[in-house]
Image: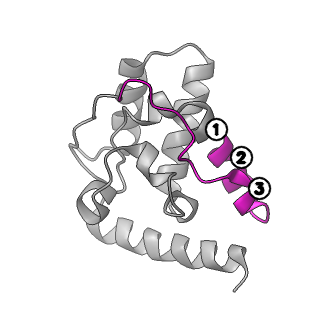
Amino acid sequence: MPVYIWVLLVALGGAIVWRVTGTGGSGHHPDPRPGITGITVVDAERYASAPQVKEIYTMARAVPNVLDGLFCHCDCAREFGHRSLLTCFESDHAAGCQVCLQEAAMAYQMTQDGAVLGQIRARIDATFGNG
């Protein structure tokens, strides 16, 4: 099955789950681990047929220390045991999840604009939290 079809199916499934369960709510942001790198982020070239996904996986690899300090509001911590938003990009999970992709893109852009982790957390919670 071509990657783009798989990504579409996962995205649709994720959207249904997200719609039914809501976002992660009042999740706790983890402390970023010292020395964390983006080496475990899936190579963005895997998503060559999905340019937006490819771009955001590239962003994730560039700011692993930030993503490792963010709670992911798609509820993957409860459903899959993910530690942080970075964990979503260590597999194909984020490729099919608009919440993960949007959180990571927001975190990357805010980092580029000079925001610190606390500011990024506050914006992520205000945008994706439901409480």
Q: Does the magenta stretch include residue 38?
A: yes
In the depicted structure, whether residue 48 falls above or below residue 41: below
Upstream in sequence: badge 3 or badge 1: 3
Is residue 75 visible from the viewing direction of this image?
no
Residue receiving disc 3: 51
Question: What residue sits right under mark 1 in the picture?
Answer: 59
Q: Are marks 1 and 2 in contact (CB under 8 Å)?
A: yes
Q: Give the range drawn in magenta.
A: 33-58
Mark 2 closeness class: few <14, some 14–19, many ≥20 residues within 10 Å? some
Quadrant hosting residue 11? bottom right
Q: In this rendering, would 13 be left or right of 5?
A: left
Pointer 1 local density, CA inside 10 Å: few below 14, some 14–19, many at least 20: many
Q: Return the residue at label 2.
A: 55
Q: Is residue 72 left or right of residue 130?
A: right
The spot of residue 66 in percent (x, y) is 46, 29
Foreground of the two, 21 or 53: 53
Q: Which residue is drawn at 56% across and 48% down?
A: 41
Q: Is 53 placed left or right of 124 in the picture?
A: right
